[in-house]
Every structure is written in structure tokens, then in C-alpha cells.
Amino acid sequence: MLSRLQQFAWASFFSLSFLVSSFSSSLAANAAASPPNFNNCLFRDLWEYSDLAVNQGQAGRGYTWGLESYGTYEESYTDAPTQQRLVQYFAKSRMELAGDGKSVTTGLLTKELVSGLVQEGDNSFRQLAPATIAVAGDATSDNPSPSYASFKAVVSLSPTENRAPAQPGQLVTAALNQSGQVTTLANLPAQVKIGGYRPELGHNVPEIFLKFQSAQGKVWQNGWQQSFVYTADPTSNVFGLPISEPYWVQASVGGQLLPVLVQLFERRILTYTPSNSPEYQVEMGNIGQHYHLWRYNGVPGPQTSACAIDLTAHSQSGTVRTPRAPVNCAVAKCIALTYDDGPTAYTPMILDALKARSAVATFFVLGDKLDYFKPTLNRILQEGNEIGNHSWSHPHLPKLSAGQVRSEIQRTQDKIKLLTGYLPLVMRPPYGETNPTVARNVGLPQILWSVETFDWRDSNTYLTTQRALAQARPGRIILMHDTHRSTALAAPAIIDGLQGQGYTLVTISELFDLANNPARLSAGQVVTAR
Ligand code: ZN
């Protein structure tokens, strides 16, 4: 059945990849094997973000890219400035350096494997045979899983091809076999519900895959952070659009025949294996490995040492916040000043007052202002204060869709990171408005307040000061706004007054000891005081 070329491919594949076949669960949970070297430091940064925690056994999820590099290449691409493009193959995908040399993309590998068309320019393609490689399970010739070629008759390579009607809430009952036949299962391996519909190519996506795409977890970004593992926007180019319906397939996994739910996306494959332990039930398919096998016959490509991971740099947090002497708020009389809606021209007045009194506060900033306030933002951190996320544009979050909520928060996280190197650990919803959808999607603890000064309403320095001092209690969080000059003018008297009452002014992270106990506040948790 196999052509000479395919036999060669399988044989060489086996010789190099016994490591790879045990990828998903076992390696992730066990001691770390060395990460690969990278062709470009942007590739390294991207790998580190999602896969370093997996590699260190700290993630409770599978790899996004994979442990092994299959090779680095200059692939010809007619529309690139040099007509070549720097790429590197991993088990789960291919990284590509964009033409500007400043960003990384991934290819539409699934489309190429199913159609047989290798993309060599924005509009130029080379025809190979569609890949007869199993989409799920073992890389063995007796694996009964459908191959990429098996999907050819059911995928949408254009918006008019094989569209499915929206089926929200329905169970996935369709099965696909190696010859591409679709049947309806009477006995379902698991109850998997459709959770959403992508209208572009007309395909349903199971709830479990949607949940996976927007999952949050431990990531490395200038320090260990809790954030979206893949993307705040599931339609972004991490996965691409779904090009098939989800199908149950029979696949040989570690030599065992198992039902696996498979769905093809433009750039990735997602699999759901009901018999896996919960954290590894949904995984990325090994599409980078399959693609490399198809296009390069699995012959390992050139390796690189251009950019390596410095593991020692990851043993400490990489934030630029100036460390302060530890405060134990279980013993000390702590209180937290918070300033919302900035930064503004008044923010430095507050910073001056804090610094002169060795006090700190937390600034919940708006993303869409930040480009104008880079020096202020960095000063906030350098003087030991904390930056929190107050959304991008100050909307009423409960009125937004889940995707819009994620975007409001993630864009702001990205901007703060870009301008300071620091990624906030806490957020405050605008107007203090939240609901369960907001809570599920903000990805950070929601810090509200226990003392309202009405500084925004009264713009009165005296009243703001009096209200802050009169309601002070250990563990409380005081709300103010650095958008008001009257508030900035109140800062010296408020700080003096609180310190005179024996209070230690701390940041939100200090109030909850997040440095030593990052799990003390969970993503979405609503917090009003210690
Ligand atoms: Zn606000």
C-alpha cells in the first residue's frame, strides 16, 4: 500500500522520534528534558511563553510547540522581501519569521496537508499529494485514524465548501473513518456539546475546544505569570478558523485503540481523548511533526544554536518592580491606597507624596492612555508601587461579550508589558461592575474596594482626605482617582494621617502576599478587602 517514498518517510520517522511519540502526558509531567535551541530569539520568546512551564513540569497541560526541533530552514516564499523565510519546525507547529523580522507567525499547515498544496507565496502554491499521515495517535502504519487526505471531502478550503449549519448545544455524533466516510454514532464515547459556531467557513466548535483555546495558566513573560496560555482572542492566528466539523475517530494511541475527537483548524489540530487524565484530555495535534514528515520526509533538518534559553534566568521573577522590604500584613496594620483611570499629569504629584513618605500605592491604569505616559508608568514601578489593569477603554464590562472582555484586559496587559516589562497581577473592572462572564474572562483577580472617597464626584481635597481617614481600618482598600487634581493634592495629608495612625501603606500584591503565595487570589475572584 505504501509508496517507496512513504516507506522511507515512515522508516526515517521512527528512527528519530521515539522521544516524540511519548510527548503529550508523560513528558509534561516528568522531569524536564532540555528545551531546544532556536533559530531566532523571537522564536525562543514565543516558546518560553507557553512551553517553559510545561517543560519545567509546572503547567498541568501539554506542549503548545513541543520539546523537539525538527530543523530550521530558509524556505522560499516569493512574497517575502528576500524571497525566503526563516522557519523552525516543532511537533505542534511551525514558527515563521514575518517579513518585517519583528514578529512570528505560523503557517496554514492543516490546509496544506489536506489539499496537498504547499504555499510558496501569498498566491503561489506547489502541488504535492495530500498527506496520508494519521491526524491522531501513533505514527504507525496500522493506526486506523483518518489521515489528512481522509478529510479532503469534508473540509472547507473555501467559504462555500462543506459548510455545516449551526448546531449550538447539540452533541457531537459524527464519526469519520480512514476512507473519509462520515457516519453517525449510536453509542457516543463521551457527551461532547457544541459550544459555538464560526460563520466564516461555517463550522461548529465543541465547548471543550473553546474552553481550551481561552485557557489561562502559568506562562513565562519576564517572570512567571498567570495569563492566557494561547490567546485572549480565539480567532487570532494561533489556531486559525475551524475548517472541519469535530469528528470522532478510532486511533491507535500508544498501541491501544481509543476513540478520539478531532477537529481541524487552519493552523492547528485539536484532539479530545476522553480516557486521558482531565488536564491532558484536550491537546494540540502533532501537526508540525506531520507536516515536516510530509514535506521533508521526516529527515531531520539543520539545527541551530542561534538563540538558547537561559534557564538560570527563569529561577527568579523578571519584573522591573523595585523590591521592597517584606511586609507581613498578618501582623502589620496594612492599608492600600488605589488610584484609578490614570496615568495623568497629576500622577507624578501623588508619586512625589508617596516617595517622600516611603509609602506605596497601586495604580489601576487604562491601556489606551499608556503610550503617552511611559516615563510615569516606569516611575510607578521603580518606586515600588504596583500597576493594575483597569481595562483598555473603561467600558461597562458586563455589557461586553466574553471575547471583548478578554481583549480589553489582554491588550492592556500587552501594552504595559511592552512599555515597562512588567505584567500586572491584578485588575479592577471599570465602575466596579462585574458578572460571572466578566469573572470567567478577565484572567486576573478583580480588586474592588472597601473605602469610597467620592473624590470623582466632589473634586474636593478636604472631603477626600476626611473620608479616606475616617473609614480607614486594617486590611481595607481605599478608592481614589488620579484624574483629579484635588485627589493629588490630598495625597500628602492622607499618607501622613494614615501613618500617624500606625498604618503601613502597601500595594495590593503586598496586602495579599502574592509574592510568596501567588495562588492566594484566583483569576476572576472579587476582592474588596484583606
Ligand atoms: Zn475607573
Image (spheres, grey):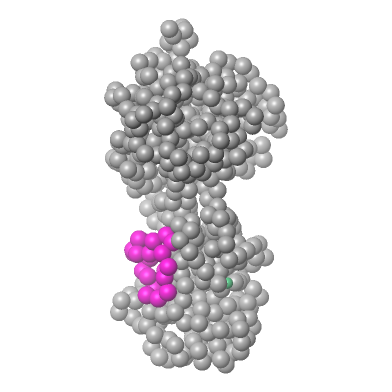
| Magenta-tinted stretch | 509-530
User: Is 56 included in the stretch rendered in magenta?
Assistant: no
Q: Nearer the viewer, residue 208 or 320?
A: 208
Magenta segment, prevailing SS (helix, strand or loop): loop
Q: Does the rendering let one see residue 353?
A: yes
Spot occupied by residue 211 in the image (x, y as percentages of width and height): 44, 46
The quadrant of the image that shows the C terminus is: bottom left
Taking 86 as reference, is 44 left or right? left
Residue drawn 35% across the image and 61% down it: 519
Residue drawn 44% across the image and 79% down it: 450
Q: Does the rendering let one see residue 93?
A: no
Spot occupied by residue 170 in the image (x, y as percentages of width and height): 45, 40
Spot occupied by residue 45 in the image (x, y as percentages of width and height): 50, 45
The quadrant of the image that shows the N terminus is: top left
Q: Nearer the viewer, residue 454 or 263?
A: 263
Residue drawn 45% across the image and 57% down it: 440
Q: Nearer the viewer, residue 498 or 410?
A: 410
Residue 197 position (above or below residue 396)? above
Q: Residue 165 is drawn in which quadrant?
A: top right
Residue drawn 42% across the image and 57% down it: 317
Spot occupied by residue 125 in the image (x, y as percentages of width and height): 65, 21
Q: Nearer the viewer, residue 255 or 92?
A: 255
